[in-house]
Amino acid sequence: MWLIRIAWRNFQYRALSSLLTTLSLTLGVALVVLVLAVVGIVSEAFSRNAQVGYNLVVGPKGSALQLTLNSVYYLSQPIENLPFTEYMEFFDKDTRAKMVRTYGGDPALGERAGKYSAHTNGGFAIPLALGDYLGEYRVVGTTPQFFEDLRYGPELTEPFSFREGRALKSYTEENSFFEAVLGFRVAKTMNLKVGDTFNSTHGDPEGMGHGQGFVVVGVMEPTGTPNDRVALVNLEGFYLLEKHAKPLNGDEVIAPATEGIVDAKGFKQITIPEREVTSILIRSGNPMLGVVLQNTINESLRAQAAAPAGEITKLMDAFIGPVLTALLVITLITCVVAAVGVLVAIYNSMNDRRRDIAVMRALGARRDSVTAIILAESLLIAVIGAVAGWLLAHGTIWLASGVIEQQVGIQVGIFSVSEYETWVFPLVIMLALFAGFLPAMSAYRTNVATNLSA
Amino acid sequence: MPNPYSDGSGGEVLQITNLIMRYDQPGGGSLTVLDIPEFSIGTGEQLAMVGQSGGGKTTLLHLIAGLLAPTSGSIKLAGVELSTLSEQGRDRCRAANVGYVFQTFNLLPAFTALENVQLGMAFGQRPVDTARAKDLLDRVGLSDRMTYKPRQLSVGQQQRVAIARALAGKPKLLLADEPTANVDPASADSVLDLIINSCRDEDIALLMVTHAMEVTERFSRVDRLDEINRVLLATQSEN
């Protein structure tokens, strides 16, 4: 107990030097804990975002990662489009026939079941059409099914709920085909609310604005998923915007729609040959057979199927993981530098305290006692630095928790501890022991007779 | 608790026989600084040792305290032969049996007066007795300075704290290395009184090294180092 007390007194006696070395260690530990927290938050955000309630994303042939990025995260540019008939392959004969009657198209399409329909029986296939922007945010055309079938959250049990309004519908008397639902960040940033109208821009954020606007009918609650950053519009309305319908070349067989809707302004659904989708979100009826469906689609000529979870894991492993690791290594080096600072500070003070050590030896202190006092001093700096650094980091995280929750939807408390954080404390103690070793050895070797006489 | 580093006989607290201390010389060879055939101090005895500067007085004190190991010979401290002990054993023996008052006080600047006195007990086998530390400070007239750091004390006060520290561990032998050399004459008397009276009160043997003849007047036994150290005897006869 007296050894600790002596070490503490020495710490107090060289207050400025002790505080500065402790501060450098505090900042080093805080950096490591913060980086670990960032790693945790980024990993959690990625894995949470990969938990999307569907097991496959289907799009045109190309990069599976690009397909995942633009369809799951609404990032990067879409590869190309798929004909609507690819989407129809996920439906049974009756549904396909109804699509032909509703939109108009080749009657032969309704005379057979889609070739993947057996796999999606009990699951779903939700179309996405990308290409427009609202400010910096993606405008994505989809169907009401997006809100009916998709779930989010750790257990994938939470349906989308609305801060205000409701889900979009395929057609209403009031808004025709032009209803939109905004993610909460889009609504907040763009200052839009239910009842407002917006006009998307074509191709990129700076692109030409479409003449036809969409009416906001709902604003979603925060989900912590990329859906907070998207404006979802009715796919039928999306098709009706300028340059969104695929030009016909005249060779198409089109039976006119018999069950289609024409609104008061004369807008009506476009025909199947004019329709394209950017991607299709698929949940297979039997998730265990998702790989079979993925392989089947990948063997086809036009489409590819990507498993988002797998692609995200690859992305993490290939790019984000190494960057985060590099960041972590750099911050660990900061800790090592701080530990070297502890070494230098204590070692430099050894000249001043050789007489003190000699006096303690004369009072009966053993060599290992004075060695232990120096190590205890180094450990004190480490413990105070580690605790202060941990508190500083978690205080910062706590202060930023509101922003973090807003940005990525992850709730972090002041005592949220990352998996690897428990290693920081023993690591700092080890570093302190190493830092204290050299001065401690110097104390051990102090010549008592010489220093008492000095 | 019995003292493992004392034979408890109550006879001589220090017995030195055929003590030789040599230092290796940088250029080769060695320099003999002490050659003492016989020297002893009885329990509770008070002795002043005089000798010129550089005569080996401090080296003798370091040998008695076990801070240095002799080249040859025997030092029995409280009945324990120091040469049979490891360095750690000598440390323990010192903590149990020796109090040390230095010429330059050597108080630890980071600690208060009370803590400095407590340090006198911190490295021994017995637990630190705070009540005794306070009592000792009271006896040296510093009961109102217990929380003061050494730099806040006068030179005389610092030496009194050093005396209290040396007495704290209830040693059998107090070694005082020119304790009045750095204090003014008025304080020197009170410092001497304090050391001599405290040792008498607690039945502690006292070996005070000095080169001040006025100090020796206070002692009934005064030994001259040049009379017991054959190295100095030889030097004198050469002269």
Image (tube, grey):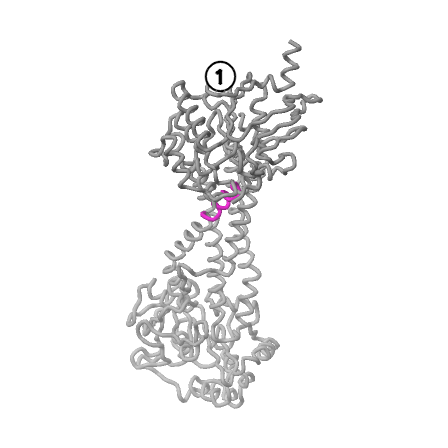
Q: Is residue B171 left or right of residue B194?
A: right
**Location of residue A169 with respect to A28 vertically, above or below:** below
**What residue appears at the point 57 percent right and 60 percent down from the top-left corner?**
A318
Magenta stretch prevailing secondary structure: helix
Image height of A395 relative to B177, above or below: below
The residue range painted magenta reads A373-384
Res A24 seen here? no
Return the residue nearer the eye: A41 or A204: A41
Give left or right: position of B122 versus A238: right
Q: Is residue A79 magenta?
A: no
Residue beneath disc 1 = B212
- Residue A424 x %, y %: 51, 54
Q: Secondary structure at mark 1?
A: loop
Residue B35 appears at what percent x and percent y? 65, 22
Is any atom of residue A93 visible in this view?
yes
* Residue A142, image quadrant: bottom left
Chain to which the residue tagged by mark 1 belongs: B
Q: Nearer the viewer, residue A427 or A45?
A: A427
Residue at 41 percent across and 62 percent down: it is A412
- Report how many numbered discs are placed on residues in the image: 1
Picture quadrant of residue A180: bottom left
Amino acid type, label 1: Ala
Residue B230: name its quadrant: top right
What percent of the width, then of the height, locates residue B161? 42, 31
**Disc 1: CA contacts within 10 A as few (<14), some (14-19) or many (>=20):** some
Front-most of residues A317 and B58: B58
**A388 left or right of B18?**
left
Residue that protrudes farthest toward the right in the picture = B29
Compared with A170, A325 (above or below) is above
Counting from the top left corner in percent of width and height, residue A36 is at 49, 56
**Residue A375 in magenta stretch:** yes
| Looking at the image, residue A343 lies above or below residue B101 | below
